[in-house]
Image (cartoon, helix red, strand yellow):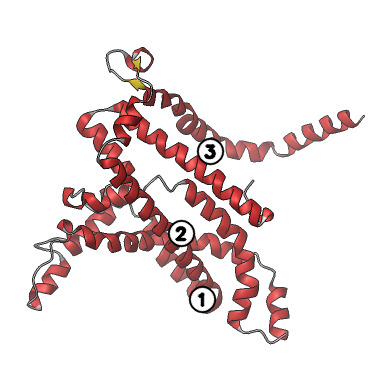
Amino acid sequence: MRAKKARGMSKGQSKKNKKLLLMCSPALIFLFLFHYIPMGGLILAFKNFRYDKGILGSEWCGLENFKFFLQSDNAWRITRNTLAFNLVFLLLGTIFSVAVALMLNEVISKGARKFYQTAMFLPYFLSWVVVGYMLYAFLDQNNGIINILLRKMGEAEVMWYLKPGVWIFLLPLIFLWKSVGYNSVIYYASLLSIDNSYYEAASLDGASAWQKIRYITLPHLKPLIIMMTILGIGKIFNSDFGLFFQATMDSSALYPVTDVLDTYVYRALKVTGDVGMSAAVGFYQSIVGFILVLVTNGIIRKIDKESAMF
């Protein structure tokens, strides 16, 4: 009887959720076509790929592609750059996104919120090509706005695209300008779901604005912050290609600082055409990201089981 009831309930639920499943189908088809089917190409990481023989016909080479990458002089540099920048992006992105969400909720008036949301959200829709040329208009050696102002003040011009040290600070600023508006909306939406009775009770007890944020707002945001951090750690070996390639105009003088795994793979394919080594680097990125997600979630699960993703 229980089995029959369970079957009846499952059939009823499937009928009830048919419209929702239909709405999800385009995204599921996209995910299957462009994320799951291409996983078959991972075998390229273990093959000495030849175009005339194809993927299946090429000879197996074991871990030679991984050895070639890990033993090269570039492995440490691009791994260091990828990890360092993504850690900075994750830390600063979370802090500034939460801060902006709090400002929208606590400081800015209701009438002005839409304007600020739109103004901060707009950079997210700009492609990195557009952002790269906007930045070039400021930093160009001859006609850049900054160098024109420096010349008028009698100062020497700065060759921005030949100074790697400057981009350590410049890239995080560009990243924050482009992404904080989008991420803050996610946290702001979570703030709107907090029951207003908590704040009313805190006001009756004489709590200040900071105390409300500390003891009500931030604890409610904690699960979302943890989830977004875990997802960010999972992508810590995947850099934003557009940021590091377009914003820097692919200047070779900046490679010591701006060369990351994604740009390295692109150049490896473009210059050498080494598909096997490029596939090995991509596989290396995915495996390390997967391990980091499991480790991070495991640590959080031990500290606070309810905050873990799984």
Q: Residue sitting at 41 percent across and 36 percent down?
A: 284
**Is 250 drawn above or below residue 7 in the view shown?**
below
* Mark number, residue 182: 2
Please tell me in which quadrant of the rendered image residue 54 appears.
top left
User: Looking at the image, which is closer to me, 67 or 138?
Assistant: 67
Q: Residue sitting at 16 percent across and 68 percent down?
A: 145
Mark 1 residue type: Gly
SS label for mark 2: helix
Q: Residues within 10 Å of mark 3 (few under 14, many from 20)?
A: few
Could you tell me residue 16's position as x and y percent?
A: 74, 39
Q: Please report contact status of discs 1 and 3: CB closer than 8 Å, yes or no.
A: no
Residue 260: in sight, yes or no? no
Q: Please report contact status of discs 3 and 2: CB closer than 8 Å, yes or no.
A: no
Residue on which disc 1 sits: 111
Could you tell me residue 210's position as x and y percent?
A: 58, 80
Residue on which disc 3 sits: 27
SS label for mark 1: helix
**Is 100 drawn above or below residue 75 in the view shown?**
below
Could you tell me residue 207's position as x and y percent?
A: 66, 84
Q: Disc 3 versus disc 2: distance between alpha carbons?
A: 21 Å
User: Looking at the image, which is closer to me, 168 or 104?
Assistant: 168
User: Looking at the image, which is closer to me, 308 or 144?
Assistant: 308
* Mark number, residue 32: none
